Image: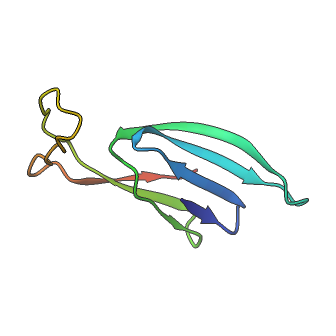
């Protein structure tokens, strides 16, 4: 989860391909603000309150068989960072 103290926005990547954004109002209440499409697997986040940008590392993964326990491997050369901002 990430938080931008300047915008009072809370960022929650889910790893399934979306980033949920919530806004903290001045009275302390939190309300849904937006849902942003990202990339499946993008679940680590860094929020930079100096630039108001959010960074999510991501990559393409090999398709594994039908075993739910099989963890897919990253495809070499596909790592990139998604940058989200105004």
Q: What residue occupies the far left of the structure in this picture?
A: 76
Q: Position of residue 20 (x, y in %)?
A: 58, 43
Q: What residue occupies the far top of the structure in this picture?
A: 66
**In the rendered image, which quarter is residue 33 located in?**
top right
Count of marks overlaid on the render: 0
Q: Residue at x 64, y 39 (%)?
A: 34
Q: How is the image coloured?
A: rainbow
From this view, report whether residue 12 is shown above or below residue 69: below
Q: Is residue 31 left or right of residue 69?
A: right
In which quadrant of the rendered image does the N terminus lie? Answer: bottom right
Q: Position of residue 42 (x, y in %)?
A: 36, 48
Q: Position of residue 30 (x, y in %)?
A: 78, 51
Q: Is residue 30 left or right of residue 18?
A: right
Q: Is residue 79 left or right of residue 31?
A: left
Q: Position of residue 54 (x, y in %)?
A: 49, 58
**In the rendered image, which quarter is residue 64 located in?**
top left
Q: Nearer the viewer, residue 84 or 66?
A: 66
Q: Nearer the viewer, residue 2 or 48?
A: 2
Q: Residue at x 68, y 69 (%)?
A: 5
């Amino acid at each position: 989860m990430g938080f931008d103290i300047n915008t009072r926005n809370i960022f929650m990547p889910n790893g399934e391909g979306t980033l949920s954004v919530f806004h903290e109002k001045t009275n302390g209440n939190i309300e849904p603000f937006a849902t942003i499409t990202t990339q499946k697997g993008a679940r680590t986040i860094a929020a930079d309150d100096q630039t108001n940008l959010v960074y999510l590392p991501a990559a393409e993964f090999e398709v594994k068989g039908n075993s739910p326990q099989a963890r897919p491997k990253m495809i070499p050369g596909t790592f990139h960072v998604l940058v989200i901002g105004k």
